[in-house]
């Protein structure tokens, strides 16, 4: 186990320097630009049931949320990393301040933003919840995981829970009085849920006795809520093997009394917490079910349909984990930018009398632009995806709903996989900008590098997302949805090319190459999946990343078009709009420009992936 | 400061699983292939002064070194991370076992491998020391840093030390009885040494009183040696401003008696250690010089030429840090490979009754090949560079010496910058292959991800290496050396293209694109540096990475040609040679294939880098 060196005197970093860099300022202006100009908030607010989400209301909600996240939650980020949650005798004490902050979060109603008014929520569209989730995660990834998992549990119960289960659990989850968890993983069953062994034996009274071990259960035990609602995958005695024999159960930490209050302790116990690389404040529990007579659970929906219900939770959670990537990237960027504007080192290359701040150095500029442009592209893509979710659920027209649902489903693995992959790169670049100081834990940049590293793993690794993108989202419909999206990219590209503005034309040039590459790859995936399944899946992650950069570049291209119009009509802040164009151009020529390399990897490179036999490794 | 959670019970990972994955096995077969087939060990052994380094002797040396590194040093890697060096009252206690292991290292003569016989070394070529350094670092990065810094101090004293200084210090450094440090950085002077403030006042007796603060001093204080020889950059009272006023001083921890034994304590004191993201076992010291009456130092060489001497140390150290990148990449690869062969999860896509080990999954295969191929390419490039160093120092022919020196100097920033950049990516991929287990510290994969993160920062960040590559190594001679190297790449490419073997032709195709891209970039750098200095430096790091993948791909192309010949002549292990061809092909189509994207970034992308004004950030 881990022993630490004794507390050391005098860190190199002066304390006031730290404070000045430690704050999170929500990028409201950027968020509102994306909401209003790219994701169509005004259109969303005309959808039946979304009428409350007028641009004015939404701006007020986001301002309030930003204030809460910056003032209450962000200050706990560093201290939580330094003093993680800890286990003692089956109980988990969360990091200092977490309990109080979660109480304030719940009381302010933030858990309920996107949930039905019927159960005490605010009933706002997903497009509005999305920036709120981004802000909470940027403020504190470890803290935000708890409500993120409650959101998933709420979604699953809304869809598959009985009226009784909804009555007992939903209001308390939506209010944040209770919290939820997802219990999938077992030591032998990670990405492969077919291997789940946890047992559920019917007791004849409508309940089941659950027994088994679940690992990696985020907020599986904690002291922030009255009760914890575990959603647990398990097998009944008669269940078939594999994923078709998995059912979903509710196993509350405390059984619920007739009056709705928490009653007797259920037989689910946290036997240890993991010692992790990052997100240390969030307790990651090993849960033991049924070691002392049996944990009591109730079935959600029908037997053997558990995976289907779990996917409801998981799809919501996957999208939210994509947002986590954007959040940590934004936070790392803000920190690196503040350092780059503060740290004086070396002369300006163009000539200066003395040393200047390092933001003058071209390579620091390149790194900042790389961080910024990837973060903005991923944000735009995620918000546009959230808007599609709202249209898919609320639009009056059936065909429009279906088209939006297809777009949303195509995008979920891209948002999850690509936003999280870039977050590691962005956080690492943030460390690099800090130089040696970035490697010192006191500075805080290293925490983002550690925290981000889980995001490409949990809620389905990038490979799992890529499998979904290749199989269910691309090949199954013969690439129809993918081609429809590429057609939209082509339309933006034509607008850019025809604009006559050099920056826009340059962006359009790379977008054209990107669309070409994506089109060829989609054709390759659709055309070869049956004949060469391993060859196609060898390119699955490169395909996901290619989709990310082309579709992210598409959104920044749209942003550049809007910004150009705004500048032409002299509307608003010209610095802001010029930066949008510059950022889009950087992304096009430094990130989107990698599209053809991905095409080569996918279309020409599969034999290299599978060239070695297992023995040859 | 950092408080840890209490020790937790029962980690998820079973202990025997850990042990089985924890070992380091030196890749001797791969190393010998590179030494003999790519780096020309036999030719090196014909150089005057290198006659002892016959292939047979070298193999025996490497086997002995491998045994020592695996058995003595590697087992301390994880425990050192868990129980870092710690500071108490000015003294530093290194991690358990380090002191004894360093004694054994010194007594076996490993510190002296590449140093002159005259001072007790073994006088072996750099090409032979190179795999030894790789192995020591792969076994334990934190441990290996200590001898790495001694190597630098020895190089500096050999070049610039007086006979007296050589007599007093060299034998003890070469034997490992004493160790060396580099004291460059100060709080305000990191990459920018012009800002160094440490003062050196002549005392009239040939000595100087040194006063000031140095930070980030690796092994600046420890308990592994009798004495520590600090090489310190400081300014004399009459020194001009900037880098032209910096002198180099020896400041030993203990003054040296007339009989050569350590005497009175000098006034240099460690006031704290840093709490770092990685390489935790290596003490990173804040050193205070002259707080109690003045630290006594002696001048190395001439006043105001300190930077020049420091560059001798630094160039040796930069090359060695490049090797550290290869080392940590190799270690991370070995660990991920062992896990991939052990972990059972999901069916084989091509159809299997039950779950199989994850090495059957195409994306795991892709990740392993990415780790392996980048590591092998970087190793080949580094070893070939070491051979050029030997030829530059020992060849009888003046023109050959000069050509090799030019090659070596061009390569140092590429080896340092590129090998370390890929090491972060490789270590991160290693975590990914482990899935959720990779994020748990007990597994050990995360340590490599943390350790690797310093490598692109210390001994000059990647940007500093890239500046060197652009300025001194490319533009200064009008691209002559770069073009000569590209001509060699073209020759290999032609051989590949003319081979008629599909794998070799495929590699040649990508190598041709890579050479085209590199050629255009060199022309751009040479042609535009004066007219658009910021634009060219905006592409400096992409240029370094481009050089890395093209030259690394070149070496793997050479390896594939050799392997094809061996297979045709049925010489040796066909699995081994087939793997060399497969690995080269993977690298060509998945890594080298990015060359044109870098060209676009560099040649077309500079305006995007500099598009935003400082206010617009």
Image (tube, coloured by chain):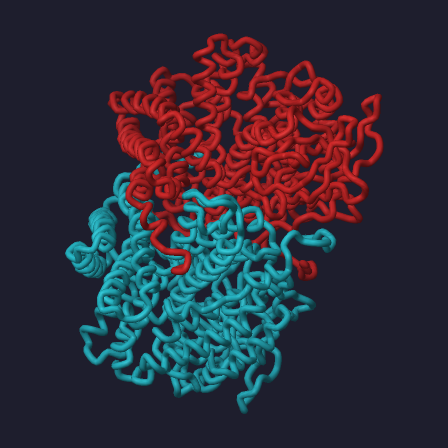
Chain colours: A red, B cyan
Say whether residue B316 is left or right of residue B204: left
Query: On screen, B259 above or below A385?
Result: below
Residue B531 at what x, y percent from top left? 23, 45
At horizontal 74% and vertical 19% (from top left) the residue drawn is A164
Q: Where, quadrant-wise, is the N terminus of chain A in this rendering?
A: bottom right
Say whether residue B390 is left or right of residue B279: left
Q: Nearer the viewer, residue A170 or B7?
A: A170
Q: Which residue lies furthest to the bottom in this view?
A: B259
Place residue A233 in its image quadrant.
top right
Badge count: 0
At horizontal 64% and vertical 25% (from top left) the residue drawn is A302
Q: Nearer the viewer, residue B582 or A419?
A: B582
Residue A355 at what x, y percent from top left? 42, 50
Q: Where, quadrant-wise, is the C terminus of chain A in this rendering?
A: bottom left
**In this rendering, does residue A338 appear at all?**
no
Query: On screen, A599 above or below B166?
Result: above
Residue B617 at what x, y percent from top left? 45, 34
**In this rendering, does residue A51 appear at all?**
yes
Residue A272 at what x, y percent from top left? 72, 49
Q: Nearer the viewer, residue A427 or A152?
A: A152
Say whether residue B499 is left or right of residue B336: left
At horizontal 48% and vertical 80% (from top left) the residue drawn is B173
Place residue B56 in its image quadrant.
bottom left
Query: On screen, A85 above or below B244?
Result: above
Q: Nearer the viewer, residue A537 or B403?
A: A537
């Amino acid at each position: 186990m881990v022993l630490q060196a004794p507390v050391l005197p005098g860190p190199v970093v002066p304390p006031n320097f730290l404070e000045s860099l430690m704050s999170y300022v929500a990028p409201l202006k950027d968020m509102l630009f994306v909401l209003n100009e790219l994701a169509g908030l005004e259109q969303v607010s005309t959808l039946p049931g979304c009428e409350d989400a007028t641009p004015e209301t939404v701006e007020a909600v986001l301002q309030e949320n930003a204030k809460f996240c910056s003032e209450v939650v962000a200050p706990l980020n560093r201290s939580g990393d330094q003093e993680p949650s800890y286990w003692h005798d089956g109980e988990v004490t969360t990091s200092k301040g977490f309990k109080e902050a979660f109480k304030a979060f719940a009381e302010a109603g933030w858990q309920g933003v996107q949930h039905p008014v019927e159960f005490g929520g605010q009933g706002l569209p997903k497009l509005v919840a999305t920036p709120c989730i981004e802000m909470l995660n940027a403020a504190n990834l470890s803290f935000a995981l708890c409500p993120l998992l409650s959101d998933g549990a709420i979604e699953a119960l809304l869809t598959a829970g009985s009226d009784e289960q909804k009555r007992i659990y939903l209001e308390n989850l939506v209010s944040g009085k209770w919290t939820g968890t997802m219990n999938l993983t077992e030591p032998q069953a990670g990405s492969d849920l077919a291997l789940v062994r946890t047992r559920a034996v019917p007791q004849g009274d409508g309940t089941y006795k659950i027994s088994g071990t679940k690992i990696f259960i985020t907020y599986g035990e904690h002291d922030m809520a009255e009760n914890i609602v575990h959603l647990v995958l398990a097998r009944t005695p008669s269940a078939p093997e594999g994923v078709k024999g998995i059912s979903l159960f509710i196993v509350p930490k405390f059984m619920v009394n007739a009056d709705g209050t928490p009653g007797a302790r259920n037989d689910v116990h946290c036997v240890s917490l993991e010692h992790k690389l990052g997100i240390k404040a969030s307790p990651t529990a090993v849960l033991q079910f049924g070691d002392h007579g049996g944990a009591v659970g109730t079935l959600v929906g029908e037997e053997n349909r558990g995976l289907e219900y779990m996917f409801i939770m998981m799809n919501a959670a996957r999208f939210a984990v994509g947002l986590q990537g954007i959040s940590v990237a934004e936070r790392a960027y803000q920190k690196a930018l503040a350092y780059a504007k503060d740290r004086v080192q070396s002369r300006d290359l163009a000539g200066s009398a003395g040393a200047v701040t390092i933001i003058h150095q071209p390579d620091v500029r390149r790194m900042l632009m790389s961080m910024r442009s990837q973060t903005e592209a991923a944000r735009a893509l995620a918000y546009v995806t959230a808007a599609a979710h709202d249209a898919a659920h609320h639009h009056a027209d059936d065909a429009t709903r279906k088209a939006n649902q297809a777009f949303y489903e195509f995008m979920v693995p891209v948002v999850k996989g690509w936003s999280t992959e870039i977050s590691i790169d962005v956080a690492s670049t943030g460390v690099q900008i800090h130089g040696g100081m970035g490697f010192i834990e006191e500075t805080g940049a290293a925490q983002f590098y550690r925290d981000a590293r889980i995001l490409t793993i949990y809620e389905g690794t990038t490979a799992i997302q890529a499998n979904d993108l290749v199989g269910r989202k691309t090949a199954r419909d013969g690439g129809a949805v993918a081609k429809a999206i590429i057609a939209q990219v082509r339309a933006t590209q034509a607008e850019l090319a025809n604009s006559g503005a050099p920056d826009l034309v340059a962006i359009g040039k790379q977008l054209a190459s990107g669309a070409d590459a994506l089109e060829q790859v989609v054709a390759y995936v659709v055309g070869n999946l049956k004949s060469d399944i391993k060859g196609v899946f060898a390119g699955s992650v490169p395909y996901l990343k290619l989709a990310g950069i082309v579709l992210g570049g598409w959104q920044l291209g749209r942003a550049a078009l809007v910004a150009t119009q705004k500048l032409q009509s002299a509307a608003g802040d010209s610095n802001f709009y010029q930066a949008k164009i510059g950022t889009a151009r950087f992304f096009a020529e430094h990130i989107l420009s990698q599209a053809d390399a991905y095409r080569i990897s996918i279309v020409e490179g599969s034999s290299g992936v599978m060239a070695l036999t297992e023995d040859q490794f």
